[in-house]
Image (spheres, grey):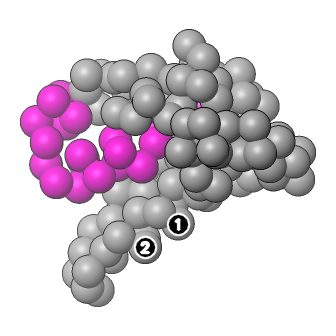
Amino acid sequence: MVTALVDTSIVVDLLRGYQPAETWATTQSTLGASRIVWLEVIEGVQNLNAQRIAMELLNSFELIEITTQDAIWATEKLLQLNLSHNIDTFDCLIAAVNHRLQIPLYTRNLKHFTPLIGSLAQAPY
């Protein structure tokens, strides 16, 4: 069972070889990533080699699927926070999984995730 999820920002840091992210990742176990994080990462790759590398990294995390309830919660939060906090659909869907599971989301985007899930949004490094 996963004890925390990673946001896209953490996966991107790992793909770029950002040393603080790599050091932090070696101290973690049982991390997961939601399907939405997978979609954001895959969307950002530039070629087949980058896609292969991204998929290898994504496969190192337990994949957590979104549920209908997650989508409903995300819709409610989007209506509540989009205009005031400029929070997008994917951020709402990512946060919904953490809200449902009540486990931390490691992210470098506290600006968007803290209004959604409060202290469950945590900076890992």
Q: Which residue is mark 2?
A: 43
Label 2 to label 1: alpha-carbon separation? 6 Å
Task: Pinpoint residue 119: horizontal percent, then vertical percent.
Answer: 56, 13
In the image as oriented, which residue stretches furthest toward the top?
119
> On the image, which quarter does residue 35 sit in?
bottom right
> Is disc 1 placed on a helix, strand or loop?
helix
- Residue at 36% x, 22% y is 123
Find out whether residue 22 is within the magenta segment: yes
Q: Which residue is mark 1?
A: 39
- Residue at 40% x, 35% y is 109
Q: At label 1, which amino acid type do we have?
A: Leu
Task: Report the span colored magenta.
Answer: 1-23
Label 2 packing within 10 angstroms: few (<14), some (14-19), many (20+): few
In the picture, which quadrant includes the N terminus? top right
- Residue at 72% x, 46% y is 78
Dot 2 and dot 1 residues touching (CB under 8 Å)? yes
> Which residue occupies the foreground of this view, 2 or 51?
51
- Residue at 22% x, 34% y is 21
> On the image, which quarter does residue 95 sit in?
top right
> Which residue occupies the foreground of this view, 97 or 71?
71
> Is disc 2 placed on a helix, strand or loop?
helix
- Left or right: 102, with 22 as reference point: right
Q: At label 2, which amino acid type do we have?
A: Glu
Task: Pinpoint residue 110: horizontal percent, then vertical percent.
Answer: 43, 28
- Left or right: 85, with 8 as reference point: right
- Residue 3 appears in the picture as rendered: no
Q: Is residue 67 above or below residue 51?
A: above
Q: Is residue 89 above or below residue 95?
A: below
Find out whether residue 82 is within the magenta segment: no
Task: Pinpoint residue 48: horizontal percent, then vertical percent.
Answer: 29, 86
